[in-house]
Amino acid sequence: MRITHVALRTLDLPLVAPFTTSFSTQTHRRVLVIELHADVDGVEVVGWGECGALSEPVYSEEYLAGVIDVTTTYLLPMLVDAQRRAPLTAETVAHHLGRIVGHRMAKAAVEMAVLDAQLRASGVSFASYLGVTRDRVPSGVSIGIQDSIPELLDVVQGYLDDGYVRLKLKIKPGWDLEPVRAVREAHPDVPLQVDANAAYTLVDATHLAKLDAYDLLLIEQPLAEDDLRQHAELATHMRTPLCLDESVVSATAAADAIALGAAQIINIKPSRVGGYLEARRIHDIASAHGIAVWCGGMLETGIGRAANAALAGMPGFTLPGDISASDRFYAEDITEPFVIEDGHLAIPREPGLARVPHAGRLEAATVDLVRLDA
Ligand code: NPG
């Protein structure tokens, strides 16, 4: 394929309720969507990409304005240069962008748009491309930090009524043992896990080990992104399985974490690791080591949610992911919404990896637009 022009759209989408983690409270999702126009054998195809970066560098070092800058200044010009020598394929994007250090979320969004265009042009769904045979994936929900335990229990009940099959509670120092105990007492059998988003240090090991009493599926990323050795040490102090999110930024990081004993489970977020192709490599490495994986989320619109649902259909994804229905976050998604049915989301089978946004809703949500010609 040959890229002809690209629109980088910043969307502003109100969330149905504020989402509080140890690092921020989000009331809106500002998200970059890439609309990539390409020529494939004389036919114009549009590919869609969505970027996981938040507007501030609080989850990882990437942030929206930085993503737009690196994408327009470096990533897209590098692909345009590469396609002068040979037609572009999704599988070569990471190679062409390899000279740029880091910026994985930006690279992931670009690769996603190219892969979407490529799959659409060949009439292949992302699920078929990955060899996925399942037709649906179990749906878990991530529950933000609430103002009080009664409010938390109300929110939990609402999600259980919706049919979610697994709960993830966000925790931080001062909001950990009490909320977990309250939810476990109210729902003795519900599959339950916690996510600290790097809010603790190894000094908290004895405190965190008290979570062992609540029969959790896992504790996710208790310590800082760079603390691989400390995570391995913490794992020896707790029975609750240790899962990494922020620390696993690549297949190499996944291999290191497994070798060190720092991860018994891995949360795979395609945006965090530089794209869906690297996400598949991490799945393969983890499976070869008997390490379970599950698919994380970055409050995706229907564009990214579609791709995540297909990825999560791969056989190593043996735990329910943060793949909720669209209405978990958005009163109106920019695509046809994903709905939860019997605790599951259907894996899309249409060509492409993204679900195509509705033109009117996309336009209405766009607050900034940068156009680039190849
Ligand atoms: O379902 O998309 C979703 C959200 C899942 O909790 C979720 N994401 O750290 O995993 C995380 C977390 C997150 C929240 C990430 C807010 C970034 C911002």
Image: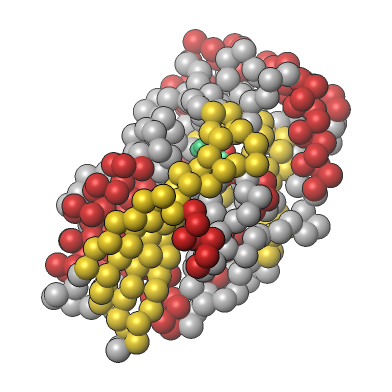
- What residue sits 14% from the left and 67% below the top? 81
Q: Is residue 364 visible?
A: yes
Residue 205 percent across, percent down from the top left = 55, 14
Residue 113 picture location, percent across and down:
38, 65
Q: What percent of the width, then of the height, locates residue 341? A: 78, 59
Task: Give whichever of 304, 210 is nearer the camera.
Answer: 304
Q: In which quadrant will I find the C terminus? A: bottom left
Q: Could you tell me which quadrant the N terminus lies in? A: bottom left
The residue at 30%/89% (across/down) is: 42
> Can you say whether 269 is above or below 46 in the image?
above
Q: Give me the residue at 80% from left, 48% from top.
A: 162
Which residue: 71% across, 59% down? 339
Q: How is the image coloured?
A: secondary structure
Residue 214 shows in the view: no
Q: Quadrant of ligand 1?
A: top right
Quadrant assignment, res 160: top right
Q: Nearer the viewer, residue 372 or 286?
A: 372
Of residues 130 and 63, which is closer to you in this image? 63
